[in-house]
Amino acid sequence: MFLKYKNLRGNSVLINHEKIHLRQQLELLIIPFFVIYGIEFCVRLAQYKNWHMAYKNISFEREAYSNEKDLDYIKSRPLYVFINYFRR
Ligand SMILES: [Zn+2]
């Protein structure tokens, strides 16, 4: 979501990260994705009191960062699997 953190990563990994977000957005019919993303960011910010830590710990980002290096991840990704990343 925030390009400045992506400069250090390879292009195919970056594209894969965005593909994971695209899949998450489709599963949530797009608008709710951004609503939940925003709400969870605020919750994480209260939890970590650090902007970058809050961002990295949003469930959608946890899933995307955990799996972005697996370029075949999207092919075998279970539906709504980001729910598993909501754990504290
Ligand atoms: Zn992201």
Image (cartoon, rainbow, N blue to C red):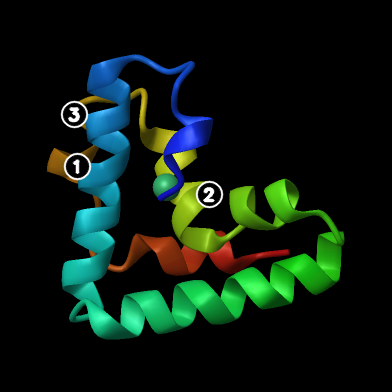
Is residue 82 toward the left or the right of residue 58 in the image? left
Residue 77 image point, x, y percent: 24, 49
The answer to whether residue 46 shows anywhere in this view is: yes
Check disc 2: other Cα within 10 Å, few if <14, some if 14-19, many if 20+.
some
Q: Secondary structure at mark 2?
A: helix
Q: Quadrant of residue 19?
A: top left
Residue 41 image point, x, y percent: 62, 69
Which sits in the foreground, 67 or 43?
Answer: 43
* First of labels 2, 3 by sequence position: 2
The disc placed on residue 8 is none
Gap in Å between the C-alphas at discs 2 and 3?
17 Å
The answer to whether residue 78 shows anywhere in this view is: no
Q: Secondary structure at mark 1?
A: helix
Q: Residue furthest front?
A: 4
Gap in Å between the C-alphas at discs 3 and 1?
6 Å
Q: Quadrant of residue 6?
A: top left
Q: Which of the two marks, 2 or 3, is nearer to us in this view?
A: 2
Gap in Å between the C-alphas at discs 2 and 1?
15 Å
Q: Secondary structure at mark 3?
A: loop
Amino acid at the residue labelled 2: Arg
Q: Residue at x 18, y 29 (%)?
A: 72
Q: Which residue is mark 2?
A: 62
The disc placed on residue 72 is 3
Report if the CB atoms under discs 3 and 1 are less than 8 Å apart: yes
Report if the CB atoms under discs 2 and 3 are less than 8 Å apart: no
From the image, which quarter does the C terminus lie in?
Answer: bottom right
The disc placed on residue 74 is 1
Q: Quadrant of residue 87?
A: bottom right
Q: Residue at x 52, y 76 (%)?
A: 38
Check disc 3: other Cα within 10 Å, few if <14, some if 14-19, many if 20+.
few
Q: Residue at x 13, y 40 (%)?
A: 75
